[in-house]
Image (tube, rainbow, N blue to C red):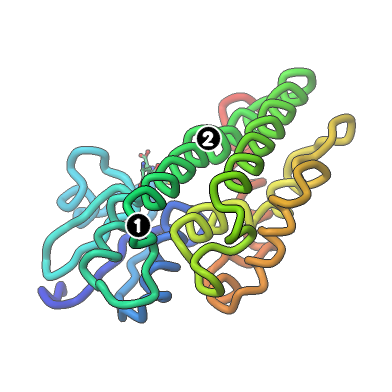
Amino acid sequence: MEDKHEVLLLGSWYRSYCTRVELALKLKGIPYRYIEEDLTKKSELLLKYNPVHKKIPVLVHNGKPIVESLVILEYIDENWNHSPKLLPEDPYQRAKVRFWVNYYDEKIKSGSMPIILSRGKERKKAIEDLNKSISVFEEGIKKDFPEKFPFFNGDTLGLLDIVVGANACNYEAFEEVIDSEDTESPSEKNLDFFNWMNALKEHPLMKDTLPPRDKLVAKLKEELLHSPRV
Ligand SMILES: N[C@@H](CCC(=O)N[C@@H](CS)C(=O)NCC(=O)O)C(=O)O
């Protein structure tokens, strides 16, 4: 039964697009009901609330759906306008955060998929490409937010911590699943970036929300077995 006044999240426990929404809801102290979706058998609710993309996460607030994780995060920040704010007050700072969030999704989050799906030389190249993208990201945010690195918004989580941390805090599980023996793994390079992730992993909200490492490794291995390139 749906309650028109509640906040409902359709998600999947190991997908970082969903973890980022859970982190924002918890950070703002917004109570929500969570429904785990099986993407091999999409529910009527998912198809009804996200008929265009048919993807998770979907946030349903007062019976109205909001889709696309970054749109959802901004909705949460605007609708529950109290502190802590996910985005800075200053429009130029906001623009810079949005720029790096988009860069992260396009180059780094997406850059891990070619690694998982490839082998041998192809995988080595994909790892090198990812390392380069992380270097550009690391240098960029150090330059754009010199006073705030490694944490944004002081000691509370900001949009970049949430988007990046929901994904990259799981780097150890990811590295366990890929075999990068003959290549420098991402965490051996870009030490500032991974120090930031290691600090974030200790944040109570992250500890409470990130998927358990062993369970995630098992899930990623299972997905790998079913991936078309293996
Ligand atoms: N741009 C979307 C991406 C969401 C997305 O890719 N969701 C995946 C799970 S991680 C999904 O629902 N996939 C189902 C499908 O492609 O059929 C967002 O930011 O929310």
Q: Pointer 1 and pointer 2: residues touching (CB < 8 Å)?
A: no
**Residue lying at 54% horizontally and 33% vertically, measured from the top left:** 107
Q: SS for tag 2?
A: loop
**Residue lying at 42% horizontally and 57% vertically, measured from the top left:** 18
Q: Position of residue 116 (x, y in %)?
A: 65, 34
Q: Quadrant of ligand 1?
A: top left
Hey, what amino acid is under mark 1? Asp
Q: Nearer the viewer, residue 115 or 81?
A: 81
Q: Position of residue 92 (x, y in %)?
A: 37, 48
Say whether residue 21 is left or right of residue 112: left
Height in image: 180 above or below 37? above
Is the C terminus in the top left, top right, bottom left or bottom right quadrant? top right
Q: Nearer the viewer, residue 216 or 167?
A: 167
Is residue 80 visible in the rendered image? The answer is yes
**Residue lying at 43% horizontally and 52% vertically, measured from the top left:** 17
Mark closest to the chain's N terminus, 1 or 2? 1
Q: Nearer the viewer, residue 224 or 32?
A: 32
Where is mark 1, residue-wise?
Answer: 90
Q: Which mark is residue 20?
A: none
Hey, what amino acid is under mark 2? Ser
Height in image: 104 above or below 153? above
Where is mark 2, residue-wise?
Answer: 110
Q: Position of residue 81 (x, y in %)?
A: 25, 72
Say whether residue 146 is left or right of residue 24: right
Q: Quadrant of residue 26?
A: bottom left
Is residue 40 visible in the rendered image? The answer is no
Q: Residues within 10 Å of mark 2 (few under 14, many from 20)?
A: few
Q: Residues within 10 Å of mark 1 (few under 14, many from 20)?
A: few
